[in-house]
Amino acid sequence: MMKQFLYLALPCAILPQPLSAQQGPIAATSVEVDAWVAADGNTDARLDRTEFEVFVRAMAETGQTTARQIRMFGAFGFAFGIADKDNDGFVSPGELRAADDNHRDRN
């Protein structure tokens, strides 16, 4: 029951967060939601460094390109530092999407 709630609540929590790097809603795939739910152990809708690594590993298992590169190079800390734009020690869904989009734009 809790997982079903999170499937419904997480996209709603993600969608209204505008970013300076990307305005408007953030669309999350079911794979991304599954990985986020699995990684966000304390269900606070943001990832700390340890949760971020769990998320990246889960996404790498699905074949997501950026996550596979991070995992291959063991660059979890480096990637976390890039994604955590406001340097609060956590990565929000919006920060994560912006970091991935920026990485894809450069490659």
Image: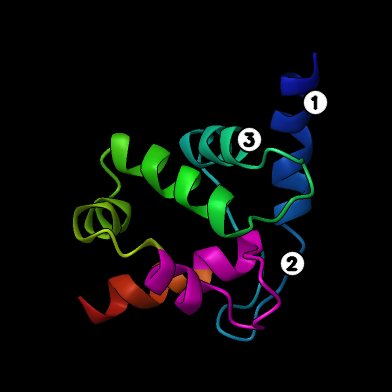
Q: In this rendered view, identify the residue nearer to me: 80 or 23.
A: 80
Q: CA distance from mark 1 to mark 2?
A: 19 Å
**x%, y% of residue 58?**
41, 37
SS at circle 3: helix
Label whose residue precedes the other's in the sequence (1 or 3) = 1
| Amino acid on which the number 2 mark rests in the picture | Gln
Image position, residue 44 (x, y; %):
79, 49
Location of residue 84 by image quarter: bottom right
In what quadrant of the picture does the C terminus appear?
A: bottom left
Q: CA distance from mark 1 to mark 3?
A: 11 Å
Q: Which residues are magenta?
A: 77-97
Crowding at mark 3 (Cα within 10 Å: few <14, some 14-19, many 20+): some
The residue depicted at 64 percent of the width and 82 percent of the height is 87
Residue 93 lies, with reference to residue 101, above or below; the image says above
Residue wearing tag 1:
5
Residue contact between numbered discs 3 and 2, judged by CB atoms under 8 Å: no
Residue at screen point 63% across, 86% down? 20
Q: In the picture shown, does residue 81 fall above or below 100?
A: below
Q: Which residue is mark 3?
A: 37
Instruction: Give whichever of 43, 106 is nearer the camera.
Output: 43
Q: Quadrant of the N terminus?
A: top right
